[in-house]
Image (cartoon, grey):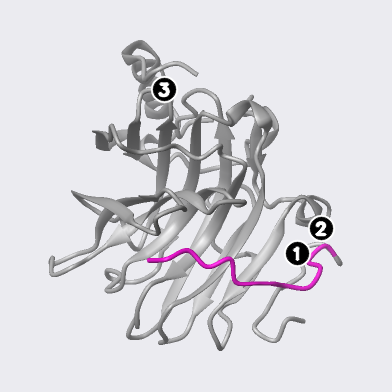
Amino acid sequence: MDDDAGTPAADVSRTSFDVVSADGSQSADRPSRDVALRDLAAADRGPDFLGAARCGTADVLLCEGFEAWGASSRNWRTVFAGSPRPMLEVASGRAARGQYALHIKGLNQGDNSARITRPLPASLSGHMFARAFVYIDMDTPLANFEISTVREPRIGRRFVVGGERRGRPVSSMRIEWGDGVTSVHSQYTSRSPVPVNRWSCWEWEFDGSTKQLRVWVDESKVIDITQPTWTAPRFEEITFGYRNGHVEPGGYDVWIDEVAANDRRIGCAR
């Protein structure tokens, strides 16, 4: 899918948990660290990693848990594409951690999106990790979709994490990248199904120096590839939300919580 910056929405920092609706109102992966993270996760309610809000103690460079969105929304820009616009809100009722989460709901329509985006810390310009808790409330997405994008906006270079079905029984985890110069985009779809109807923890690593691209779901690695011809973005901007690539019968209903970015593995337990 070609990336579309969409149309910036109106200011979303009006009041706490204000709804943005359709009307506009550094090191390689270290086994010892993985073991420590798995052990911590096992003591933390098993594979679900749910519970209290933890951004305040996560010790990462960027973390947004949507618990104080009235103040933290000033750090983010909301972007929509497609008509009618999907609904985007920060709401209670189905949070992975704490009380609130980002909620996106779209109708049965083609290419459309509702996302939040912000600048990344400069220290993540060439090698970064990002994480999001994701709840896809449907049996399996039929269309290809995006959950997060890392971009170098000035030339369009980007890296995308999402899913794609493409003739398979269920949607599978997928990454996509483009150089922003030739408009040629490459992608890799794993055999690992996209988790649905439950909270799951997605983490990904982009290493521009080694050309390595990795994705974990609930601490299990599902994508690990090297792309010698890939030119990494400068990782200036990160986006979270939902972008739907084609018609999705019945629409989509997605929740995202405790998104984070860091220069080392984040894991699901913190």
Which portion, as a residue range, is magenta?
1-13
Residue pointed to by mark 3: 37
Tell me which corner region of the image, top left, top right, bottom left or bottom right, holds residue 47. Answer: top left
Residue pointed to by mark 2: 70
Q: Position of residue 121 (x, y in %)?
A: 67, 33
Secondary structure of the residue carrying tag 2 is helix
**Disc 1 or 2, which lies upstream in sequence?**
1
Given the image, on which type of amino acid does mark 3 rest? Leu
Taking 110 as reference, is 6 above or below it? Answer: above
Q: Are marks 1 and 2 in contact (CB under 8 Å)?
A: yes
Residue pointed to by mark 1: 17
Mark 3: give few (<14), some (14-19) or many (20+) Cα within 10 Å: some
Tell me which corner region of the image, top left, top right, bottom left or bottom right, holds residue 203. Answer: top left
Mark 2: give few (<14), some (14-19) or many (20+) Cα within 10 Å: some
Given the image, on which type of amino acid does mark 2 rest? Gly
Q: Are marks 3 and 2 in contact (CB under 8 Å)?
A: no
What secondary structure predominates along the stretch shown in magenta? loop
Quadrant of the frame with the N terminus: bottom left
Farthest residue toward the front? 182
Q: Position of residue 183 (x, y in %)?
A: 40, 59
**Disc 3 or 1, which lies upstream in sequence?**
1
Taking 86 as reference, is 75 above or below it? Answer: above
Q: Position of residue 20 (x, y in %)?
A: 70, 74
Q: Is 8 colored magenta in this rendering? A: yes
Q: Residue at x 37, y 35 (%)?
A: 46
Q: Residue at x 64, y 55 (%)?
A: 117
Given the image, on which type of amino acid does mark 1 rest? Phe
199 left or right of 62? left
Question: 241 and 97: which one is in front?
Answer: 241
Q: Residue at x 34, y 17 (%)?
A: 35
Quadrant of the frame with the C terminus: top right
